[in-house]
Structures are given as C-alpha cells and as structure tokens.
Image (cartoon, grey):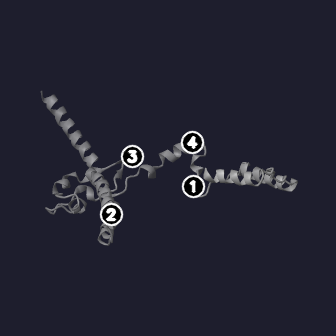
Amino acid sequence: MLSRDKNWLFWKYSSCPAISRPALTPESFQTAQKSIHALTANKRLRPSPMGSLPLDFLQTRPESALLQALADGTRTETPALAEYCDKLAVVDLDLGMARDRKERIDGAEKKASLAWRALRVAGRTRLARFDDVDEWEDLDAVFSSERKDGEVDADEADENNTPDTNGSTRDSLTQQIAVADEANADQEADQSMQE
C-alpha cells in the first residue's frame, strides 16, 4: 500500500506526465500467438505413458480363447509341500542374515505367510501330525517324511496327488475315506439282509 502511494506522489511531483506504453510490433504479436497455440494445443498421446504397464491384457479376445485361459490347470494348481519347505528354508536363511529391524520384520511376515500356506497344504495329507506341533515356528514335525514313532505315512509315496480315471485329481486321504465309506455301506447292506 505504501509503495502505491509513493508511486502516486512521485507521479504528482513530476507534473502528472501522460502514461503511455509503446505499441506492439506485428512480429512480437505473431510470436506470442504461436507460443499460445503451442501451449494450448492437444498433445499427441503415447501408446503407453512412461512408467505404466502395458494394457494388452485388456484387449478383447474370442470367448473360446478366454475359456481356454480359465481352464488352464496351472492357474489353480496348488504347489507341492516340498516347494513351501524350500521357500521356508530360504526365508530362515534370510532371517539369519538380516541386518536391520525392517528386514527382520519383513522376513518374519514372509515366514508366517509361507508357514500358513504350507500348513494348509499339509492339512490335506498330514493332519495327524499337527498334534506334534508345539509352536508355529517349529513345523519340522509336519514337514518331515517320518513320524516320531518311526511309522511312514501311506500318502508319502505319492505326495503330488494321483489322477483318477476321469482325469481329475484326488489325494490319497480322500481315496481312503471313499474306500472306508464303501466298506461301511457293504456292512450295512449285510446287516439289513440278515434281519
């Protein structure tokens, strides 16, 4: 505010000269218009902006190709228990070599996640071994191939599930249950015939 008053007083002391600006030259006007057009023009877009992932997976494909992609067995295939055991061993090694607190926390979270997944896979075939687990960090009792009493599990011979005649997969525990159900059904039929 004071600088404005100061400028007004200076203008008054110099006998109120006329305020005039020089006219623009045609060249400066044309360069200004060109720069305005360049700044406001639509820019050509790149096919994929820098730093973004390609979006090719969003392209439309025939329905048969989509169904084949969904029916692919690798999408739903559960990894074998041995893979989880190997990954857990690597994470244990990383935890032993962790230098700072963040690495230890990340390693512990990764180990907990892998342990949970491995226990879910082991629960299908080795459910009886869960009694031997005292702490979640010591899962060797579940993952070892021999039990404490020296008895080897029947399903250890084929851990990767055996294919049925119709092509679907069933683990050996399900097969054992089916055989037991058939035996129970036969016994019930024999008892009803005797009555």
Question: Please, what is the three-letter code of the amino acid marked with disc 1?
Answer: Ser
The residue that mark 3 highlights is: 168
Most foreground residue, 164 or 160: 160
Quadrant assignment for the C terminus: top left
Report helix, strand or loop for mark 2: helix
- Label whose residue precedes the other's in the sequence (2 or 1): 1
Which residue is situated farthest in the top direction here? 195
Most foreground residue, 23 or 31: 23
What's the residue at 57%, 45% (across, down)? 65
* Alpha carbons under labels 4 and 2: distance apart: 42 Å
- Label whose residue precedes the other's in the sequence (2 or 3): 2
Q: Position of residue 191 (x, y in %)?
A: 14, 32
* Alpha carbons under labels 2 and 1: distance apart: 29 Å
- In-image side of 121 versus 186 (left or right): right
Q: Nearer the viewer, mark 1 or mark 4?
A: 1
Vertical placement of 166 versus 26: above or below?
A: above
- Label whose residue precedes the other's in the sequence (3 or 4): 4
Vertical placement of 180 versus 160: above or below?
A: above
User: Can residue 97 be seen in this snapshot?
Assistant: yes
Judge the density around disc 1: few (<14), some (14-19), many (≥20) Cα neighbours within 10 Å. Answer: few
* Alpha carbons under labels 1 and 4: distance apart: 29 Å
The residue that mark 4 highlights is: 64
Q: Are marks 1 and 3 in contact (CB under 8 Å)?
A: no
- In-image side of 65 versus 115 (left or right): right
The residue that mark 2 highlights is: 107
- Label whose residue precedes the other's in the sequence (4 or 2): 4
Q: Position of residue 27 (x, y in %)?
A: 86, 56
* Alpha carbons under labels 1 and 3: distance apart: 40 Å
Question: Please, what is the three-letter code of the amino acid marked with disc 3?
Answer: Ser
Question: Please, what is the three-letter code of the amino acid marked with disc 2?
Answer: Gly
- In-image side of 88 versus 2 (left or right): left
